[in-house]
Image (tube, helix red, strand yellow):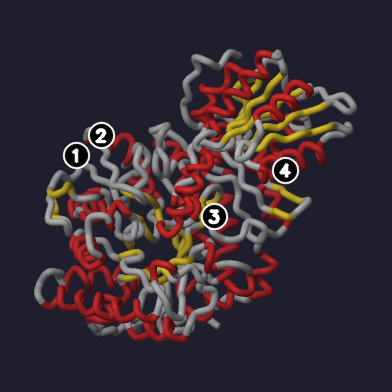
Amino acid sequence: MTISPILSANETQPKLTEMIGQKLMLDLRYFCDDGDAKQCRKPMTKLPPILAKLIEKYQIGGVILFAENVQDTKQIVELTRSLQQIGSSPMFIAIDQEGGRVARINRAEATSFTGNMSIGATYQKHGDKYATEVATIIAKELLSLGINVNFAPTVDVNANPLNPVINVRSFGEDPKRVALLGAAQVAAFEKHGVVSALKHFPGHGDTQVDSHTGLPKVEHSLAQIKQQDLLPFAQIIQNQQPGMIMTAHIQYPALDNSKVLNSKGKEMIRPATMSKAIMHDLLRNELGYQGVTITDALDMAGISDFFSPLDAVIETFNAGVDIALMPIPVRTPSDITQFEQFYSDLEKAFDNGQLQTQSLYASYQRIHKLKARIAQQSTLPSIAIARATLGNPQHRHIEAQLALAAITEVKNEGLLPLKLEKNQHIHLIMPDRQKAMALKQALLSTSATAIKITVTSLQAFKPKRAKQFISEADWIISAHASPQQSAAEIGGMDDLADLQSYELSRQEQPKALLDLMKYANSLKKESLFISLRAPYEISKYAQYNQAVLASYAYNVDVVQENDVRGPAYTALAQVILGREKALGTLPVSIETNNIDQ
């Protein structure tokens, strides 16, 4: 069944209600039949009639899906079909499926890849090959599920080693390389029927604050902004315009130092999301972008700590942004009453002149144009086709190729590849048991020689026992993932409590790891360190190891009692044991004082 365009060629101007609804994208992550919305954690996997009625009544333009909404192939297809069958208007069904750290669909089913920084590590040898292939596969898999918008690629230039939210989600620190790889992904996504959304405009790469938890401020000069932060956006807009661009909840005083009165009655510099100077004058007039703009999630602390939902949306719309993402939560039937009041207040804002109808209609036209394109490319999804597409052998082969091509040898004083003899002992020191089991299994399945592997998990370990293993081992392999997980990685603002408890369990890991490395070094043990995420940490640990590798990824795809696997671990094992060579190159600069070659 083909989805029809929303209006005919001789259309008349739509009603105010329809235009407002098209400018809203709701979060349907959880829904409970009763109770407190703040406590609701029941995944919405099947569209409740009450939500279907709300979407139809207010002609809501789109929804964003989270991991809780996309639990298996059949369920996802049935959910997206039910969403697209509401009314006659194609709906934006969006997801964050960047690959690597941010991948919402079950990794055991969908091909998730090792992420943007691993793609950046392959550029010197492979150019934009993997950027194109990754986006092509992700697009095919999403479209087979009925998902037509992907909030990707991330084209933030990661210029700050302490960036807590972007890091390996970036292709690297070279703006021109980021632009080239980002453009390749935009072209591939849209060629295969999925709307891409460049993010986070005008750039989130040089911050030390996660906009999920605070409001970052970038103090760059105008010249630096143009040469670094804006360059990927400007070049991609010029050469390969994406269907969407997503805003950043970040203050950029050099671009707009005007003030806005927040809901607490205090003046503050306008975040980019609320800046007409940035979102209209710069993006549309100067850079020439003609597509649809969408906010980052409005429930993020960078906005919600300072503005009510209504005020946030009014300021966003007045800045010229087309779509408000997650403007107000709808988690229980009682929330629907609050949504209706919110919607009524938006209508009043147009009636009383707080919002301009002319700007509303311009947004509606841009949204309509993009949806008409979707309608030409999309059909309702098929469970059989989706099952044949997701994670198929060809896709998994490309995933494995990328993981291997990205592995980077940062240091090697003759240690690698390991020359194992029968029954030799390798001791692994890993961030947690799951990662330890993934690398252990990869090493055992790759080795042609019978070997012994013991494990220390830094999540919960006994120092005395760990040191005993170290003293007995022939080789030490340790690994770490830095920085710690952000809200974007594990889902969103609803996960902050979980994130905080996770951080507490990890805050002592770097010190414990360093102590064990020093102990191994004092015993003159041959040691390898693996950076599993952002490679900046290498300078801290390299001096205690004869070899260092970077993988830019650590995720596992299959987790069962005796089967824990992931493409990064398979690739690492192949390099460590000499089956393959590490041919990746660092896409970011690291301190080299402690790295002796």
The residue where tag 3 is placed is 103
As drawn, the residue found furthest toward the left would be: 352
Tell me: residue 325, above or below residue 251: below
- Disc 3 crowd rating (10 Å Cα; few below 14, some 14-19, many 20+) is many
> Which badge, 4 or 3, comes first in the chain's sequence?
3
Q: Residue 505: percent from the left, percent from the top?
A: 53, 42
Q: Quadrant of the N terminus?
A: bottom right
Residue topped by disc 2: 220
Q: What amino acid is at disc 4?
A: Met
Q: Is tag 3's residue or tag 2's residue first in the polypeptide sequence?
A: 3
Helix, strand or loop at disc 3?
Answer: strand
Name the N-terminal-most of marks 1 and 4: 1
Query: In the rendered view, does 244 fall on the left or right side of 463?
Result: left
The answer to whether one can see residue 529 in this image is yes
State the image quarter where residue 346 is shown. Answer: bottom left
Labelled disc at residue 437: 4
- Give whichever of discs 3 and 1 has the lower sequence position: 3
Q: Amino acid at mark 3?
A: Ala
In terms of sequence position, does the residue under pointer 2 or pointer 4 come before the other?
Answer: 2
Return the x and y of residue 85 as percentages of the image width and height: 48, 83
Residue drawn where x is 61% and y is 47% of the image: 555
Cα–Cα gap, marks 3 and 1: 34 Å
Mark 2 vs 4: CB contact within 8 A: no
Judge the density around disc 1: few (<14), some (14-19), many (≥20) Cα neighbours within 10 Å: some
Q: At x 70% / y 67%, what residue is drawn?
A: 388
For the residues labelled 1 and 4, say whether their Cβ atoms are less than 8 Å apart. no
The alpha-carbon separation of the residues under discs 3 and 2 comes to: 31 Å
Given residues 435 and 510, the one toward you in this image is: 510
Q: Residue at x 34, y 38 (%)?
A: 207
| Residue where numbered disc 1 is placed | 254
Residue 373 appears in the rendering: no
Q: Mark 3 and mark 4 in contact (Cβ < 8 Å)?
A: no
